[in-house]
Amino acid sequence: MCGFIGFTGETRDGDRVLKNMLGRIAHRGPDSEDTHIDKDISLGFRRLSIIDLHNGSQPLYNEDKSKILVFNGEIYNFKILREDLIKKGHNFTTHTDSEVLIHGYEEYGKDLLLKLRGMFSFVIWDSKKKKLFAARDYFGIKPFYYYQTKDKLLFGSEIKSFLEHPDFKKELFEEKLYDYMTFSCVPGNETFFKNVYKLPPAHYMEYESGSLRITRYFQPKFKIDNDKPMEYFVDKISQSVKETVSAHKISDVEVGSFLSSGVDSEYLALELKKLGQLKTYTIGFDDKKYSEVVDAKSFADHIGAVNKARILSSEEYFSSIGTVQYHLDEPLANPSANLLFFVSDFASKDVKVVLSGEGADEMFGGYNVYKEPLALDNYQKLPLWFRKSLVFVVDFLPEFKGKNFIIRGSKTIEERYVGNSNIFNIREKRKILKNKYIEKPAKDYLEDIYKEVLNEDDVTKMQYADIHFWMVQEILLKADKMSMAHSLELRVPFLDREIFKLASTIPTKYKVSKLNTKLAFRKAAEKEMPEHMAQRKKMAFPLPLVEWLREDRYCEIIRTYFCNDTSKKFFNQSEIIKLLNEHKTSKKNNARKIWTILTFLVWYEEYFIKR
């Protein structure tokens, strides 16, 4: 929907500073720009007009202008909230969803947050109390960053806007490199910029007289219902998907949909098509092994939707690396980010809003790795001492089929599962990183998260970890930044509080088996589409990166980065060149490792050399 920035206190030439900060995030809202500036607060807003196209500019004020709002996101139940607030005596000046936040805060205070259904990050400044209140949505769909000095608070939708403020000191938080090399992103609430933080999902922030306090207002908890049959959950999922798509379609502009060959996006597109004409967008490659274009087109034809596909070349993909990392703010080595960048660009030529299937895997048990506890079940019945002894024997042997099974089967779920990215282990980081950092096992990052689900089964624990970790740090980061880079609002109907209420009750036996994932979800989809489409295996934004990284032209580009002065500051160059050579000659598949290193170097170049 938009982007906002702000800072407390007075700043020399504050009008110009605010203008420049807004310029950094103009892509988030090309339709209009507005500001509020006084001696206590400066607020800036860039708008992407979607609801109440002519009257929804921000900052927004309450009746006596004592409270001021900037907001990024969509509130899908705003009409119900609006009616309730009007009955309570509040006067509305627009028909936007935004305005329910400022009047809702007047009426309910922080309790407003639990009444909201949507994706949001927002700030409300109370000019009478000199107090700032900010909040982020339940799952972290919309970003919120802040930077605090002794007497000033900077905040906004993207870190890059902070670069224009004279009080912002751009410093690399180098210690985060150790964490990044494990997860291919920066875990937790810190960033690669010193003193820049992310407000966690489902938290609100209060800032008053230089004091900052952060509080959790919602915690997604699983309440498994083992008393209901599969058919009950299939019917409930069917009803819920219809309802959530309808709720997420609310808009005064056309809504399109991303479409892959996966059941998540297909199910969304099908329900969206029932509500009217529909354009869908797909990205693919000349190599049919990795391309979802044919299956997506077939499905679009089946439901009577328009499908527009774009074939992406390797040249285009590699040329986008710097731009992608700049827009991400934080280095992220998920190769699919670049694909999302291009499909968003493609879709934005037609529409301002798209629906996308993020969150379905976490909600309904869709990742293939969720089948692992079932595969390990019999092996883990062997005594732990025996399994540990076996690992001691095989750990130093060359790779062989079954070695990983033996190693992972000797560990608890808390020890072995840290999400879908676990790139470099401790021994590898010791060899590759030039400088010494405090060593931390990957499992320690999720220790507190796992403590919250001590009594759940292993699959549910994995889901819970992904909702709090992988989904926030990778999936939603790239979803927001890559779409908004092209002034496109991406909505995620599966990441909805009503969907979670249902998903949190589904027993594991209705989520995964040894053969497939999202069992109940797929059964619900089968009510609306052919079985072979509903049961199709997950591909997860496939691309030929492994092959591309063995081509001479791209190896030489990467070699240039691996041998430059920046690389010399952070990495043992002989070791990372070895990784590249091993991959090029097909001795090993080091694609994710190479991409993780390259991404950091490109990101560093964008933020600390070019800018």
Image (cartoon, rainbow, N blue to C red):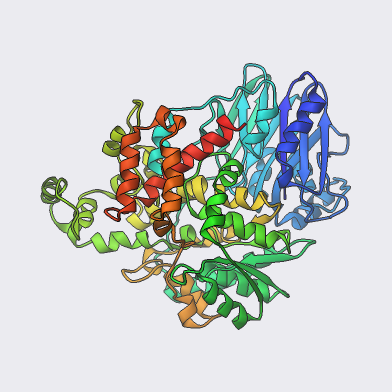
Q: Nearer the viewer, residue 184 or 570?
A: 570
Q: Position of residue 192 (x, y in %)?
A: 51, 32
Q: Residue at x 43, y 46 (%)?
A: 556
Q: Position of residue 256 (x, y in %)?
A: 68, 66
Q: Is residue 85 left or right of residue 570?
A: right
Task: Quadrant for residue 254, please give it.
Answer: bottom right
Query: Can I make out residue 163 in this image?
Result: yes
Q: Residue at x 64, y 38 (%)?
A: 158
Task: Quadrant for residue 252, please give it.
Answer: bottom right
Q: Position of residue 474 (x, y in %)?
A: 50, 48
User: How many marks are shown on the rendered structure?
Assistant: 0
Above or below for 597 versus 272: above
Q: Nearer the viewer, residue 186 or 431?
A: 431
Q: Residue at x 49, y 27 (%)?
A: 173
Q: Nearer the viewer, residue 333 or 274?
A: 333
Q: Please state, as top left, top right, bottom left or bottom right, where the C terminus lies in the image.
A: top right
Q: Is residue 466 left or right of residue 324?
A: left
Q: Position of residue 425 (x, y in %)?
A: 30, 41
Task: Quadrant for residue 50, please give it.
Answer: bottom right
